[in-house]
Image: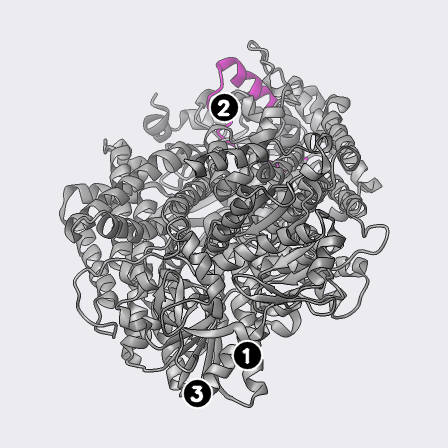
Amino acid sequence: MLSAILASGLAIGAVYALIGVTYNVMFSASRVMSFTAGQLGMLGGVLGSAFILRMGVPILPGLVLTLATCAAIGVATEIVAVRPVLNSLEQHLYVLSTLAFALMIQQLVAIFWSTEPQPFPRLIGIGSGGPEDEKFWLPLVACAAVVGCLEFLYRRTLVGRAFLAIAEDNFAARALGLPERDLRMASYAIAGAIGGVAGFASGEMLLAFFANGGILNFYGFVPVALGGLGNNRGAIVGGLALGVFQQAANFLVGGVFAGVAVFAVFIVVLLAAPQGLFGAAPARRV
Amino acid sequence: MNTTRRTLVLGASTLLAAPAIIRSARADAEPIRFGWLTTMTGPLSAPGIGFDRGVRWAAEQINANGGVQGRKIEVITRDTQGDPTKAVNAVQELINRVKVHSVFGPTNSGEALATTPILARAKIPTLTAGVVDSLIDPAKFPNAFRVAASNTQWDDAVRNYTLKIVKGKKIAITADATGYGTSAVNASLASFKKEGAEIVFDGVIDATQADVTPDMLRMKNSGADVLVSWTVSAGMAARQMNARAAMNWDVPIVGHPALGTGDIARLLDKPANWEKVYMIGYRSSSYDASGKLPPRAQALVDKIKGKVQLDDTLLWWILSGVDGVNLIADAVKETKGDSSSEAIIGYLNGLKGYPGVFGTYRFSPEQHNGFPPEEVVMQQASKRRDGAFDLAPGYT
Amino acid sequence: MGGFRSLAPWAAIAGFAMLLPFAFNEFWVVIGTRAAIYWVLVAGLNLAVGFAGQLAIGYVALLTLGSYTASILVQRYGLSPYVALVGAATVGAVSGVIVGLPALRLRTFYFAMTTLGFATIVTQVALAWQSVTGGGIGLPGPEMPAPFDSTKGFYAFCMGLAGLCTWMSANIASSRFGRALVALRDAEVAAEATGISKTALLMTVFLFAGATGGVAGGLFATLQSYITPDAFTFDLSVLFFIAILIGGRGSILGPLLGTVILTILPEFAAPLVAWSTFLYAVLLLAIVLAMPGGIAALLDFSNRKPLQSDRAIIPRPELLAELLPNGGGQDDIALRGIVLAFGGVRAIDGLDLTVRPGEVHGLIGPNGSGKTTTLNVICGFNVPEAGEARLGAAPLPAGDSRGRAGMGIARTFQTPRLVGEASVLENVMIGGTISGQGSFVESLLRLPRHGRDEAALTARAMLALRATGLETLAHVRADRLQHSELRFMEIARAAMLAPKFLLLDEPAAGLSPDEIGRLGVLIKAIARQGTGVLLVEHHADLIFDICDQVTVLNLGRELAAGTPAEIRAHKEVVSAYLGG
């Protein structure tokens, strides 16, 4: 019983964590929080289902196609909703432009895909719904793989270091001659792919459902807020904790109260520690 | 093609239905304007799409046969997307701008609760397919007639089946955390308690929750031996059935008609997960031992098969849509072409057994719940063909 | 500003609203009622979103609370619908503050998310608390008594309230409170430096917005005739929010038109109902990218006239006697042993500094020597780790940037902080916000003290503009000004306080030699009125020309201090900095 709740909580938590990382990767490159993060997670499931079940693409090419499309949508986010408003960052127009873009994505899926949850293909076929089922551990595997790849990218490759330099100090990085715009687009592509992985790996659990976007937007943001902006470790810990907390609350109190409990904890923690539990102090203002 | 021309003519008549032209035309050539409010798009659209097929089919049939006393039935459809705000706007438009003679819908109870008082003020004859009991009150809403089962009828059917046939001793009641879901849980709870049944669990689940295992564990731990489900969400219903199988929890699920929708079939891990699921249905969409529907419904299905899609919806939605149009058409016919509110309401109040394809309706000035309780039955979700089902064990 | 022309659109809207019930069928009367109700909510929300820039996107929560409060008071407690509306306003006001509270601690995206969370909680509670709210079944809305029980009567009632809300929000918009809200949005640091209290102001506005949201909810319940939690969709939140943005931030007319358009649009596009949210989103994106000023900017004809291109700033120092009549008093600003580090780097490392009334004190030094940081310590934007700052005998509380204005310390900024969409006059009036006497409620209702405040502030701001040579630009949008003009505008804004001390952060940067000359004259004249001036500057000529005292900083320490003549002779300074 405990194992079932843990399996389910960790699986959902891994998805929240990955969406949190999606937020972070976008933020690091552009200082922008984008409402499209959750929608990318939703698209991972919908596109996976569309490619594999509707069009009959085999699973691996289906995964590649899904990630490529999500990466392209990440880049589109950058071009359409982020770059034009970067000049007036302090006006926070990005909140509006990315909200608009996210709503457009969600509504297009609602209209052209379905407003009912659609099935997602069985990827490997291990387990029969119990805690050992692939639908519970695939998101965790995906989360670990993404963390590993990001670590490798940031620590071991030159491009990755350039990403870090941009995240650290945008202006200085540009002054050093780093191609800031290309790196930003690359970051958004990576963010898109990470969101896609989150949705694809959790497709069997979350199903291919247009409303997942808004849900992931919120629950994926909670770990970012708690863990501190740009802090991937915080996002992963926060995401997993949130997933387990949520499923434990569903088991213990259930229904409306469980939902309200998550929101209440989120708001209270945020008010107590606006920079997140692992966050840094705010930047200089004058 | 015949159909195409008919569609064109219908479309043209819609375009020309401007008030000025209507006034200049002869009164008896004025179309009977049938306002039809339902959810055609959005998350609650599955029933609306089904009803709509019936409504359009019936109107096309009548018009192809010369209409009612020479008058066409004009269906004015408004998609409310399950949103009471849109429903109120739409109903105001139908009353004041389109000037409809009658209204069918909204099919969603939450919307109907808001539109019913408005339609009552305007005295527009209204056919209601929503289940909530308070939608029907001949004193407050003398214009509103229910042409489907009421929530009490549903509750009675589920309770009787759960207690008498399934012989449940410890009952868990659940639904999704929507307006309808929470109210359905409470009504069902009251209904079971009245009979002295032991309720070990009652509560709602967020329909979008990714994994319902924790909630199902809670129900299992409470010792439940039957699960009563009022969810209208295919995703949540399928997740519950999948979790039930994964937990090796062999309890029957009894409940809302949506437990039988085709969407669920596609979301199940394996078809066997749909076994031991019994949901509310109607005589008119239940197969007998020889695989036949009741005669009136069977005749209609024979007629529409191939022309109206049946396999992705529930047959009773279509049947109810057909009856909605026919009731109003017959009201105008029987009152010699009088399409006034008083005439239609008067006709409906006098019905003592109108033989519809969905059910046999009885109304009186004091009783506007017209659907016969004995035609509400339980069906087996897994035994489905063309949107109709086999009766659940215990029914003949 | 052409009183008639600015009133014309309002007259047209009012006229149309009065004719509507007679010219159209009842359906349009209902749609008009709905638009009026939404506007009652948006009128308040506009002050929080459009003016103060707080991204409250889950505002349907207030509509929900108002609807349920009014319905419960009428249905369960049998109160009159009018009392119920007052109750809805009260509950809305309290909840408005609760929704708004996080805005004090959280920035933009975070705040937006908490408002979404709040909206979810409210709906969930409405679902769960069945004994009061009716749960999923809901409950009937209040029925208005005669003469407001008919469609047209209720329309008139809602229009009346909409008119009242328009009037009140327009009163706030054109008051010092409205200007302060916009300043908090676009130039928060400058707002703080002029003594505007973000906490008090935002809470007041959220209180007001909550109250109008609550009233709108009560009216909504009557219009809907019956309420269930399903009625309060996220789409409504989006509608309210987008109405403000397509209308244009910082405008009343724009969001009003935005609300009307978004309410009516779906009625013309019934077949497109599935696309409505998508179209809202496209509209929002288009507005943000192509027309950030919204409808209001489209309607702003007066600011499309080209400005005179060869204009010059001619300050009139002789007016300063009237502008700064009281002098600077007797107290010095004294810094003693200030130490301040940013992450391992000591920006200020044991600095002593005294600025006297009536003197121009120059502060020079290479980049990173701690000049602006010193200014920030005096102004309370940076908190020193050691040392003390005093004004005469009174300590300058560390970090209390908002309290400095009240102590008579004003400043300008290295990068001018301004409200681009407001006129130059309004920007300058922001500087005098704390001198107003009237309360928010007095401004809301246009009571006499509000009028006196406005008259006094306008007169004083015009005087400041004449003194700084900008009076011809008074009604021009500030973002159309040249950089040099903005420098003078900031000085005018700072002068609104009649400060004892004026802190100028590189005021000559970007100015032509002529302009620097005039700036020098102006600064000296200000000091002659008794105001102490601390001048951070790179233009050595200007420093040596007008300063009475000069302090040279290097690596956060005083390298040299004395009269300009002494500094010019200081060997280390000459070799290290002046490059002579």
Mark 3 crowd level (few <14, some 14–19, many ≥20, 10 Å Cα): many
- Spatial distance from mark 2 to mark 3, Cα to Cα? 87 Å
Pick whichever, C384 or B227, lies toward us. Answer: B227
In the rendered image, residues at marks 2 and 3 fall on the same chain: no
Quadrant hosting residue B211? bottom left
**Is B11 inside the magenta-drawn segment?**
no
Q: Which residues are magenta?
A: C498-522
Q: Nearer the viewer, mark 2 or mark 1?
A: 1
Q: Three-letter amino acid code at disc 2? A: Ala
Residue B156 badge: 1
Residue B346 in view, yes or no? yes
Position of A68 compared to B31: left or right? left
Q: Which residue is mark 2?
A: C508
- At x 44%, y 39%, the residue is B3
Mark 1 and mark 3 in contact (Cβ < 8 Å)? no
Q: SS at mark 2?
A: loop
Q: Which residue is mark 3?
A: B168
Q: Reply above or below: C1 against C392.
A: above
Pick whichever, A21 or C415, lies toward us. Answer: A21
**Is C500 inside the magenta-drawn segment?**
yes
